[in-house]
Image (spheres, grey):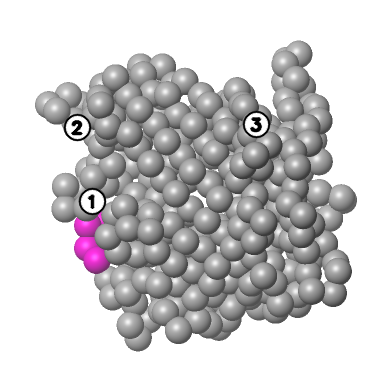
């Protein structure tokens, strides 16, 4: 079942919220602003309904607070070093919105746009669509992108991103929603258990841009292959990575659909298993959420939520040794991620 309501207005334009319901009690709510995941309600074995997604109760809070909460990121997720890249002999300059680097598509990335949408009751899905003009935020090519969200009967949230272009351009989409398996506003994520199917990470410079070097996780604080409580090595990782984890974990072959993560809340026992066709995932432990009001007058602070963002490698446009994110006319970018809850 699909329901809709008006969540708010931006300069007189109404912003709908679309909610997908399955028969088990799962609900996924997405805003037309930024194709933003605002709420993910998961039913528990004892009949409770837990919202495992951080968010806000007004459109004004999404605009004022920033932080990309739940947004569909584009044209390029994560960082581009030096806010520039060369493609087919042309040098392109982007906005250095995290000086001197470019982050999450620039000053007005796709998570700040108002998307059109259509719903499909048979699939229990909603598909959002956006057009990005040639040279918007400095990127070449007019791009038409979609963000499709589906809530399945087996409590899976499916995210599919597609994009086509009329000029060669980098495309790297992801979703930036913050998980808390204990429920939004219910403490931090340091007691969660996380397993990541990654043998290595990309080394980064102080601006969190990859150096090009690949580092094995074995014997380091980044080793989540067997699963461990996130807070186990937190004191050791904080001096290394700007107050917590914010790292690109390498998952394997581009385009191959695989299980990449298992995340379990220590208070609720809710487990989320992630699958993706992307070759990497950014694990961000919510180091800079800071003190802010969340949904239902809850309080969010650092580590109140965490992100798992499947995508292409950061700065791959400047690292030819990394898998490519370049999409050319006639090609279709396709990102497929699923989060299964139990």
**Horizontal placement of 84 versus 22: left or right?**
left
* Residue placed most toward the observer, 253 or 226: 253
Name the mark on residue 86: 2
Q: How many marks?
A: 3
Where is residue 334 drawn, in percent x and y?
A: 38, 41
* Residue 137, image quadrant: top left
Main secondary-structure element of the magenta-colored stretch: strand
* Residue 179, image quadrant: bottom right
- Vertical order, 300 against 173 (above or below): below
**Horizontal placement of 136 versus 154: left or right?**
left
> For numbered disc 3, what is the local secondary structure?
strand
Where is residue 7 drawn, in percent x and y?
A: 79, 31
Is 212 magenta? The answer is: yes
Residue found at x 61% / y 57%: 156
- Vertical order, 79 against 134 (above or below): below
**Horizontal placement of 268 versus 154: left or right?**
right
Q: Using the numbered discs, state the Cα–Cα distance from disc 1 to disc 2 in whole angstroms.
A: 16 Å
Q: Using the numbered discs, state the Cα–Cα distance from disc 2 to disc 3 in whole angstroms.
A: 39 Å
Name the mark on residue 250: none
Q: Is residue 241 visible?
A: no
- Vertical order, 140 against 201 (above or below): above
Residue numbers of the magenta segment: 210-214
Residue found at x 71% / y 44%: 20
Q: Which residue is mark 3?
A: 119
Tell me if mark 3 has few (under 14), some (14-19) or many (20+) residues whose alpha carbon lies within 10 angstroms of its own.
some
**Horizontal placement of 70 versus 322: left or right?**
right
Which quadrant would the N terminus be assigned to in this image? top right
Q: Which residue is mark 1?
A: 323
């Amino acid at each position: 079942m699909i329901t809709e309501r008006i969540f708010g207005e931006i300069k007189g334009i109404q912003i709908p919220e679309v909610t997908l319901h399955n028969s088990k009690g799962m609900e996924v709510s997405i805003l037309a602003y930024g194709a933003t995941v605002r709420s993910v309600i998961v039913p528990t074995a004892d009949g409770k309904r837990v919202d495992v997604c951080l968010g806000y109760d007004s459109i004004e809070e999404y605009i004022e607070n920033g932080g990309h909460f739940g947004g569909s990121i584009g044209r390029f997720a994560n960082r581009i070093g030096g806010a520039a890249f060369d493609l087919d002999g042309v040098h392109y300059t982007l906005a250095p919105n995290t000086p001197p680097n470019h982050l999450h598509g620039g000053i007005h990335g796709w998570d700040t746009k108002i998307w059109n949408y259509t719903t499909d009751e048979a699939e229990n899905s909603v598909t959002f669509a956006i057009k990005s003009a040639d040279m918007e935020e400095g990127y070449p090519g007019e791009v038409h992108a979609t963000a499709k969200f589906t809530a399945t009967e087996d409590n899976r949230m499916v995210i599919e991103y597609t994009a086509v272009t009329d000029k060669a351009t980098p495309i790297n989409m992801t979703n930036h929603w913050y998980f808390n398996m204990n429920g939004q506003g219910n403490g931090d994520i340091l007691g969660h258990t996380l397993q990541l199917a990654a043998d290595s990470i990309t080394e980064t410079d102080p601006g969190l841009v990859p150096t090009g070097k690949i580092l094995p996780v074995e014997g380091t604080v980044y080793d989540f292959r067997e699963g461990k409580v996130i807070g186990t090595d937190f004191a050791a990782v904080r001096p290394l990575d700007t107050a917590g984890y914010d790292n690109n974990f390498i998952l394997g072959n581009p385009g191959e659909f695989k299980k990449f993560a298992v995340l379990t809340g220590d208070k609720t026992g809710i487990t989320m298993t992630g699958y993706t066709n992307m070759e990497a995932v950014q694990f961000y432990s919510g180091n800079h959420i800071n003190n802010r009001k969340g949904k239902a007058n809850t309080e969010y602070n650092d580590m109140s939520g965490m992100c798992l963002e499947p995508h292409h490698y950061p700065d791959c446009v400047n690292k030819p040794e990394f898998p490519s994110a370049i999409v050319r006319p006639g090609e279709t970018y396709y990102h497929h991620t699923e989060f299964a809850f139990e």
